[in-house]
Every structure is written in structure tokens, then in C-alpha cells.
Amino acid sequence: MAGRSVKTEAVVLRSLRFGEADRILHVYTADRGRMGAIAKGARKTKSRFGGRLEPLSHVELVLHVGSGELATVTGAALVRSHAAAREEPYRLSVGLVAAEAMLRLFPEQERSDRAFTALTRFLDLLDELPAREGFRPELDALGLAFQLKLLWVAGYLPHLGSCAECGADGPFAGFSARAGGVVCRSCAEAANAIALSPGGAAGLEELLRKPLAESEGVQLDPRGARETLAAVTACYEYHGGFRLRTLSA
């Protein structure tokens, strides 16, 4: 069989059933960025892959890369299972939003050490994230901070220190993905901005500036969290032309 074998660390972002016993995987690898792969027989009871290819798993994969669109998984070893994140509904919901953001923001075969490091750190923190009964997972500070950092790594760093249209120091009344960040009241309408309260503007800046490990300490009120999510969503729509399905479910 033509092609070559590649060993790389990877995170499973999505796993889809294929045929009678196979799985199609979308993974983000340390060496090659996002890739598609097929794990043949992965759904069989006695599969050699066991439960190592579940979404959010951090694994070391051996891939046979040929001329087709999909590599073939020939070996898989766990680095970290992240079962704690996957088996608790709140954490899983936060994690699946983050996984889809990775899929949509980073094209195939484009390596990014910063993106891979951010993803693995996020998953480590997700394992310890307190479950919040009655709280919307999409508004979780860790998940919002991770998505803001992904936008940064992908080249869409929001401008937050001054009005992105006129350069005024503030106060800021809106966020405009077209303008590239926060805007003052005078520029908000022309920039087609979404509303942004002082708490929302402060929350955006703090979540982007602080390390992921400190994101849960950010004082983000419900309104500020909703506005932050709206700003992230606006960036996806303007820069990438997409909406995350995990946010609309």
C-alpha cells in the first residue's frame, strides 16, 4: 500500500460512524494541524482501538497517509483520556463548542503549535471545571476565553484598547467584527456594532488577556457573558462565514 506512516500527538475533535464498524475522525495534530482519518473496525466490540478515539481524547496516533483525503489510523495510545470532561454533561457541552471552533477556524494541513498547546491546556482545565446546574455551558468563562484565544491565534485578534473605528479611548458602546473590535457610541451605528455594556467590554479584555487557567476567576455577569458570546459569534460570521452548530443546538 503506497504512502507512509506518521506518528503524532492529536486531539479527537469529532468522531462519526461510518459503514458497519468504522469511524471517521476529525483530529487536530501537533505535527500537521487538522486532519481527517478513518479508524477501521473501531466500533467493533473487540476493536484494537478500544475507547481511545472518543471526542476530546488526547492521543498519540500512528497514521498511514496515502493519496486519499483520509489517513488511516493504524495505532492509537492515550496521552490523556479526558473522561472527566466527556462524562459530565456540562463539561462535555463546553468541550464540544471548543472542539467545533477548532474545526472551523483552522484549515486542514496547517500546523499551529500555539493552537495545539491552547487546546491541550483547555482540555486539562476542562477536566476540573465545576459543573454549574442551571447555567448555560456556552456562557462559561473558560469556554469563552478559549474561543477568544483561538481567534487571536487564527489572526483575528479583537482590538479592545480603543475604538476600532476612530481611535477614541472610550467609553465603548458596541463590538463590530467588521471594524475589528470595540467601538465608541459615535461609531457604533455606522460600524453595525452589537451592543456592549461596560461590564461586557471589561470582560472581553480580561478573558483575552489572562491565561486560560485564570479565566474562571474573571468576574463576568450574565449580561457580560452573553455579550462576549455575541462578539465571538460575530467574529465567526464575519471572518469565517460560519456559525457553530453547537451554539445553536
Image (spheres, rainbow, N blue to C red):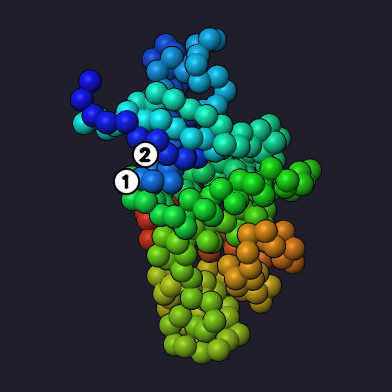
The label shown at residue 98 is none
Q: Residues within 10 Å of mark 2 (few under 14, many from 20)?
A: many
Confirm or deny contact between disc 2 and disc 1 (CB under 8 A).
yes
Res 245 seen here: no
Kindly give the residue lying farthest to the bottom in the view shown.
Answer: 168
* Residue drawn at x 52%, y 29% as measured from the top left: 77
**What is the secondary structure assignment of the residue under circle 1?**
loop
Question: Residue type at mark 2?
Answer: Met
Residue 130 vs 19, above or below: the answer is: below
Residue 36 lies left or right of residue 151; in this view the side is left
| 53 vs 223, nearest the viewer | 53
Measured Cα–Cα span from mark 2 to mark 1: 6 Å
**What is the secondary structure assignment of the residue under circle 2?**
strand
**Residue 182, x across and y down, in percent:** 52, 76
Q: How many numbered discs, if any? A: 2
Residue 143 vs 66, above or below: the answer is: below
* Residue drawn at x 47%, y 88% as measured from the top left: 167
Residue 207 vs 8, above or below: the answer is: below
Question: Residue type at mark 1?
Answer: Gln
Quick one: label 2 or label 1, which is nearer the N terminus? 2
Res 132 seen here: yes
The label shown at residue 109 is 1
| 229 vs 214, nearest the viewer | 214
* Residue drawn at x 56%, y 48% as measured from the top left: 120
Image quadrant in which the N terminus is located: top left
Residue 62 lies left or right of residue 121; in this view the side is left
Q: Which residue is mark 2?
A: 35
Image quadrant in which the C terminus is located: top right
